[in-house]
Amino acid sequence: MSSPAATYDLGKLHGGLRLPSNKMESTATPLQTIPVPDQLILPIAQHVGEPAHPIVGIGEKVLKGQLLAESYGSISAPIHAPSSGTVVAIEPWPVSRRQGDKAPCIIIECDGEDRALPAAEETVPFNTIEPDSLLRKILQGGIVGLGGAVFPTGQKLMQAATMPLEYLILNGVECEPYISCDDILMREQAAEVLGGAQILMHALGLNKCYVVIESDKPEAISAIGESMATLDDDRITLKQVPTIYPSGGEDQLVQLVTNREVPTGGLPTDVGCVVQNVGTCAAIWRWIVEGEPLISRVTTVTGPGLTTPMNITARIGTTVADVIAFAGGYTEHAKQLIIGGPLCGKSVTTDRVPLVKATNCILVLDETAGTAEERPCIRCGECALVCPIQLLPQQLFWYACSDNEARLRSYGLTDCIECGCCDLVCPSHIPLTASFRNAKARIQELADEKARAERARRRFESRNERLEIEKLARESELAQQKEDARNAGPAAIEEILKRQREKQDQDRES
Amino acid sequence: MEFERRDAPFIAPTSDVSSIMRHVLFALVPAALAYVWFFGSGFIFNLIVASLFCIAGESLMLRLRGKPVESTLMDYSALVTAALLAFAMPALTPWWVTATAALFATVVAKHLYGGLGYNLFNPAMVGYVVALVAFPMHMNLWTPPRLGDIDYHFMTIAETARYTITGTFPDYLSFDAISRATPLDVVKAGLNNMLTFSELRAYPIMGDFGGRGWEWIGNFTAIGGAWLLLKKIIRWQIPFGVLMGVLAPSSLMYIMDPGINPSPGFHLFTGGTILCAFFIATDPVSAATSDRGRLVYGFGIGFIIYAIREWGSYADGVAFAVLLMNMAVPAIDYLTMPRIVGHRLKKQGDR
Ligand code: SF4
Ligand code: SF4
């Protein structure tokens, strides 16, 4: 019954930009699947939080879907083997998170058989599972936010379950240029996406779900619309939003759809919303319904420096070099390799880095950005005009240069979502976003240092206190002894004198 | 394959300072043509002198401050200052007067404050005020606009060149023969002498709204301004603010007593109101930055222009109005800070 109706009763977002989308190139071909490579590289830190702890030994044979590293600490996610083979090493390897510097990885030599671990338990319909156990089960699937934030989904849902909630919002707003993996995923796996939404609604006890898609994705909209018609679940509503960057940011999406502002430092759950990326929903469905943990993902491989832009499904751990070779290789103009989009991505120094859970896009550009000459700020205010958070980037930049922490705080540095809009409009070509990123890191460092110093100070103080107490105790003991001696004094002397007298008497008598 | 490491974002910005300044220069062309038509070649000489000395001052200061000279000159901001000065100066101005203004604008108002982006005051207006104070006689020599029915000597190019270089007239001309009171002067003096505004309107130098000739320059200036708005080089807040700042009090006064108060149209289309609204007050460096702040800033300038014309001793007050509001900018910026998304409204806050 539900047709892809357009609903524009949206809250207003400040600023933002209409950017050339550059998505046609990669959506021209249908989704392709990359064959399992000879070697898979799995960083143990693929999510926000603590790295996972490896539980396999070198030389150990593993099967597809087998647990390789377990979740460790309060925010973490496990990692599973994307294919069958042998663990040949656990060693540092270049990773995209560090822009091509090395971080610990589990390396698997694949045997090419792709044998799966036999299912441990019979999969039962999800709506017969208690919400609590469903949430615990999601924790074990190694699922993280696939929109790029890679926050462990299980923990995000556990936190959400403790809050009064109203809406589940599926994020199909892929607003960054070039990236089209969610678009393709919605076109080809609409049923899985909506199935995931139903699982989430059951787990969180919700009965309102918005699937939000940008209006420049008509194919995705009709695919989801059709799938909704088959499903006939009137809890799910489709919402179209205009194509403006960065409306796909979690807080921005909440504001756009519900007209509620996520309070500073807070989460969407503070205003009754849980936001999940559509890819994450499909991953949840695959784990809960088919028993397959997160071992592959859809990624866009694109850019003017690439021969055949396309979307691919790849096993996690496939190297970027393999992916690019699959997509026809570099053109002669390839100048810069970016993991992620052109605004929020990271440039990497080498294509030996593996595709990880966070990798939504592999972008090859034909020119090196950031070569334009930087001039002083002319206070034109364009940056403030486009900032979705209504910050004053020109002021923030000023305070970032002078390292004025108090002002940085009061001007909302921590509210900056590093969307890069301000950079794009700055006529003086000032690297504003980079300076904010650095300033945040510096402040974090200072805070860490302060915390360390505070801990050291407390330790030192408590030691002093202990020593002081011991000293006082010793002193009072000594004083007591003296006091005892003094109190006991006269009697004792008398005793001695008495004894002496007696002795003298005896001597005289004899 | 190996690559270079860079910071996001990886999309190049679309605008740059040089192109903004070039746009401003282009937008001034219609006004310049009108100015030359009505007031003669003096404007061109002023423009040349101002440009030479602005560039000289800028180069000198850049060299002294150890900054790259050539690439900084390419931001064209010195030329914009020069052009604004050329518009502010009377059409007949000896070169040393313009040179003083140009050097003061670039050396003191711009570079001693730290160069483009750091100057608190609008350089061109500082230069103008310095010239006004230092050479009051020359700065008050205004010629009448070229109009068929006004009898006066329209200076030839040779005569203008001679005056610009030497500051003297040929024997057959004199200061008094050349100069005429501007419409603003006429109205101010006339009203002080108990004439009514409608009587003054009948003077041949008066046009439909403002001074004849002046109003046409105003129109051509507004065309350039509209083009800048269209190109999003400037935003509407400041021009709107300035125009409202002039219109609101003048309309009110005119409605109360049209006999002794010049009409709002007169205020708009004489003197530097339009130029100020679109080209002077919109200098981003010395203006307020937020949208609301810019409205306040513009309105303040407009209002002060009106106040000086009405109650001050100078006939026009554009330069003073701009400089005064420049000083208020830090306060305006602070008071009009937008509410950060996700933060509570200041008033509701309990902190
Ligand atoms: S990067 Fe930060 S300051 Fe710049 S526009 Fe985005 S949120 Fe605003
Ligand atoms: S856009 Fe650039 S030049 Fe303009 S105010 Fe912002 S930082 Fe300054």
Image: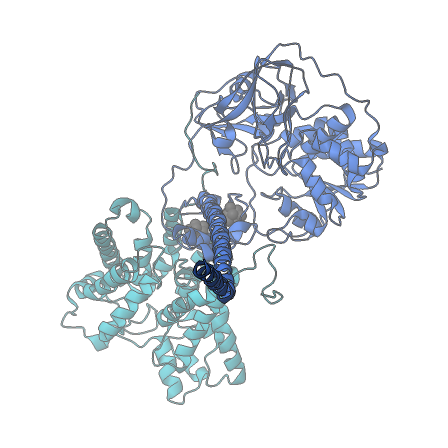
Chain colours: A blue, B cyan
The residue drawn where x is 65% and y is 53% is A261
The residue drawn where x is 81% and y is 43% is A207
The residue drawn where x is 59% and y is 18% is A57
Which quarter of the figure has residue B339?
A: bottom right
The residue drawn where x is 15% and y is 69% is B170
Seen in the image, is A108 located left or right of residue B202? right
Q: Residue furthest bottom?
A: B194
Q: Residue furthest left?
A: B171
Seen in the image, is A53 located left or right of residue B151? right
- Give the quadrant of the C terminus of chain B: bottom right
Q: Nearer the viewer, residue B181 or A329?
A: A329
| Image spot of residue B42 (x, y percent) | 26, 63
Seen in the image, is B179 located left or right of residue A490? left
| Image spot of residue A135 (x, y percent) | 75, 36
Q: Is residue B125 above or below residue A233?
A: below
Q: Is residue A321 above or below residue B164?
A: above
Is residue B230 visible from the viewing direction of this image? no
| Image spot of residue B250 (x, y percent) | 49, 77
- Give the quadrant of the N terminus of chain B: top left
Q: How many marks?
A: 0
Q: Nearer the viewer, residue A468 or B284?
A: A468
| Image spot of residue B93 (x, y percent) | 23, 67
Is residue A42 visible from the viewing direction of this image? yes
